[in-house]
Amino acid sequence: MGDDLGDEWWAHEDGSEGEEETEQDKHSAEETKRTKPEKRKRGTEQSDKAKKKKKDGGQKKGLISQQKETKDQESDKPKKKRKKKKKTITDVLATSAPKPGCPADLQDLLTRYFSDKRSVIEQEELQLQDSCFLSGNDLTHSLSSYLKQVCPKWAKLQKQHTEKSSAAVLIVCSSALRTIELIKQLTAFKGEAKAVKLFAKHIKIEEQVKLLQKGVTHIGVGTPGRIGALIEREGLSLQSLRYLILDWNWRDQKLRRMVDIPEIKLDLMKLLESVILTACKEHKVKIGLF
């Protein structure tokens, strides 16, 4: 039987199997070739990602450490001291109860103001005796009630005062608005006496000089700047002056008194220094702190 089929059958069978095996081997080899680059590519991608992650992590750590070092350096630097905000007059007075002015307050103001302008001996000349002052306002008086207290013989004084360009009473305050307010408060005190506004706002000094020359002025109410200017121009005489009332205790919206406002204080010091202090020492004028 083997001889009938011959050797070709066996050879043919072996040959076919050999070819099949060869094709399978080729197929598996091709798959292996394709798989290896893919695996290699995946491995490369994974390693790249790992390297990038490591790099990012390193950069992040470096940034954190850098920030930490900067903070440490900043903390090592001496801290700048914050400047304390200076308290204003308003801040101080808002937390304290108002106190009525007294002669010692005016004396202290004169001493401090002239401390660097006059010698010790000259400063002593500025000191006033207690007899130069009227009784103070205890913060319960209106202007009329205060004047009635310190000028009990006002009716007689009013009749005796006949000199033009002069005033028997001068009331010194901080502003034009305050002047108008005080003149309104005088109604109950002045009677038939004439009161004149003496401030610079909207009123020329020449007009005020003419007004003072026209008739007798019993009471003058105004700012120290304008009153001083009128005295310098001889538009206002202090020959008949008996009482100088300072609007000492009144405070504006910022809780400032007249002497707390630099420009007003300067004008007041000039006025006092020029003629008032001398008249007080000669017992011609008395000062009242309203």
Image (tube, rainbow, N blue to C red):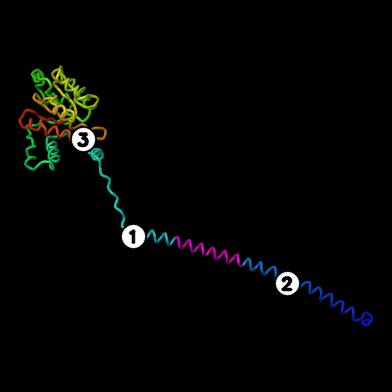
Q: Residue at x 13, y 36 (%)?
A: 106
| Residue type (three-letter) at the residue carrying disc 1 | Asp
Mark whose residue sits in front, 2 or 3: 3
* Mark 3 neighbour density, 10 Å: few (under 14) some (14–19) many (20 or more): few
Horizontally, residue 27 falls left or right of residue 209, namely right
Q: CA distance from mark 3 to mark 1?
A: 48 Å
Tags 2 and 3 in contact by the CB under 8 Å rule? Answer: no
Q: Position of residue 32 (x, y in %)?
A: 70, 70
Query: Is residue 218 on the magenta stretch?
Result: no
Mark whose residue sits in front, 3 or 1: 3
Query: Is residue 58 on the magenta stretch?
Result: yes
Q: Quadrant of residue 247?
A: top left
Horizontally, residue 151 falls left or right of residue 6, namely left
Q: Badge 3 is on which residue?
A: 263
Q: Residue at x 31, y 57 (%)?
A: 78
Q: Badge 1 is on which residue?
A: 76
Q: Quadrant of the C terminus?
A: top left
Q: Position of residue 161 (x, y in %)?
A: 9, 20
Name the N-terminal-most of marks 2 and 1. Answer: 2
Q: CA distance from mark 2 to mark 3?
A: 107 Å
Q: Badge 2 is on which residue?
A: 29
Residues in magenta, as a range:
44-63
In the image shown, does 50 or 249 lie closer to the viewer?
50
- Dominant SS of magenta comes to helix
